[in-house]
Image (cartoon, rainbow, N blue to C red):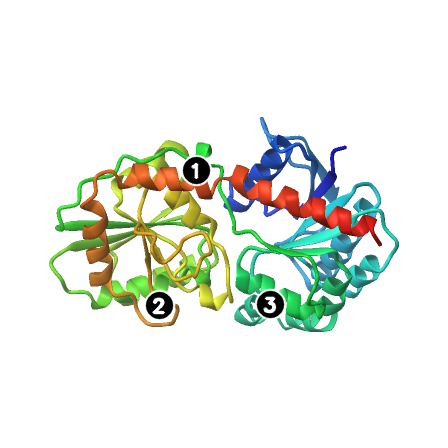
Amino acid sequence: MKVKVIYIAVYDNNKKSGVSKKIMAQIRALKQKGVDAQLVMLSREKIEFPGELDVQFYKAIVPPFRSTREKIQFTRDFANAIAENAQTCDILYCRGVVPSPFLLKAMKRERRAGIVFEIQSIAENEARIRGSRMNLLMSRLFLPGILKQCDGIVGVTEEITRHYIAVSGVWDKLHLTNPNGIDVSSVPQRTPPDFDGKRLDLLCVAQVAKWHGLDRLIKGLAKYNGKTEVTLHIVGDGSEVPNLKKITNDLKLGDRVVFHGFKTGVELDELFDKCHIGIGSLAIHRAGAGSPLKSREYCARGIPFTCSAYDDDFPYSFPYRLKVLSNESSIDISEVIEFAKRVYSDPEHPQKMRRYAEANLDWSVKMRKLKDFLEKVLEERSHR
């Protein structure tokens, strides 16, 4: 008998975002593993996903918010969506937690489904970064009770998993650390440019936020005075872009930092073929912890990359990632150049990175682990 799973997520208003792609890939992979999986997306209005899986929409107030009233209504809508869908499936799998008295009440109700939360970051740290006192207060007051009532926790890093097990206060609660993945077949393998040491092009593709730490890299560019001509290409929008433009102008780096805006398709592929090194999250400590999706895309495309996050999927011995210190210091550009020299001495590095991604990062691998975990949650509930 198939396990019936309803996957609940909040729509981020961008069908082509990394988050939307991740959710769709997870659902497809679960179905391929024999799980009866249905996606329910919280959204202000119904959105069509041409050529994608059938998506059920739950009308709700979602970010961005226009008022405090909308923020409060969002917490109520999120709780109502969980309460209603928990009566119609075996497992309710929620991407994220929105702590509130409404959700705590919903978690205490009799329900058919086991409820599992997938948690992407340490939300309390993010709330501090954003100065969101309301979110921080809600987490402190209601998150322990909500997690105590849930049936399982899936963290994308071991640090996140351990943190929320501790918050729940239930040390034997079922849990799984399952880092983010990627649909490897959805991105092309790149054709790398030559690297002769004279010019180095860096590429960051992101919905740019503070924890991407590009300010660290831009400040490093300002300090660098070596012979290699280094250019940073920033592709994407995001809340941090205006600040980065200001830093760039203040440091007079307009010719060395290029803001391309949002790119996709052939234009994005061409930038991957032009650039030598991918730039991942360089200040993940500002968010507490995380399992950046972009690192997975860089690996699948075959572009060596640098980031600051400890990542369960990339051991320290992985030769195509440069892990920089997770602090507020500027990035040492000379270190990035030396990394590029090492990697580009092996002309087959894109093929090797692609094979690693297929064996370790593809959603088919990740969802096999998740399916086993959800079945374990269901079995545990049946014995109560």
**Can you tell which of label 2 and label 3 is closer to the viewer?**
3
Quick one: which residue is furthest to the right in this view?
110
Above/below status of 287 relative to 300: below
Question: Which residue is denoted by mark 3 in the rendering?
Answer: 163
Left or right side of 196 for 272: right
Q: Earlier in the sequence, mark 1 or mark 2?
A: 2
Residues packed near mark 3 inside 10 Å, few (<14), some (14 to 19) or many (20 plus): some
User: Disc 3 and disc 1: Cα gap in Å?
Assistant: 30 Å
Q: Name which residue type carries label 2.
A: Leu
Question: Which residue is denoted by mark 2 in the rendering?
Answer: 325
Numbered label attached to residue 358: 1
User: Disc 2 and disc 3: Cα gap in Å?
Assistant: 22 Å
Quick one: which residue is furthest to the front in this view?
383
Left or right side of 286 for 382: right
Q: What residue is drawn where x is 70% and y is 64%? A: 172
| Front residue (pair 150, 121) | 150
Q: Name which residue type carries label 3.
A: His
Above/below status of 195 relative to 332: above
Quick one: which residue is furthest to the top in this view?
51
Left or right side of 262 for 343: left
Q: Which element is circle 1 on?
A: helix
Q: Which element is circle 3 on?
A: helix
Q: Percent position (x, y) of residue 303?
A: 31, 44
Q: Earlier in the sequence, mark 3 or mark 1?
A: 3
What is the total number of numbered labels drawn onto the structure image? 3
Q: Name which residue type carries label 1.
A: Glu
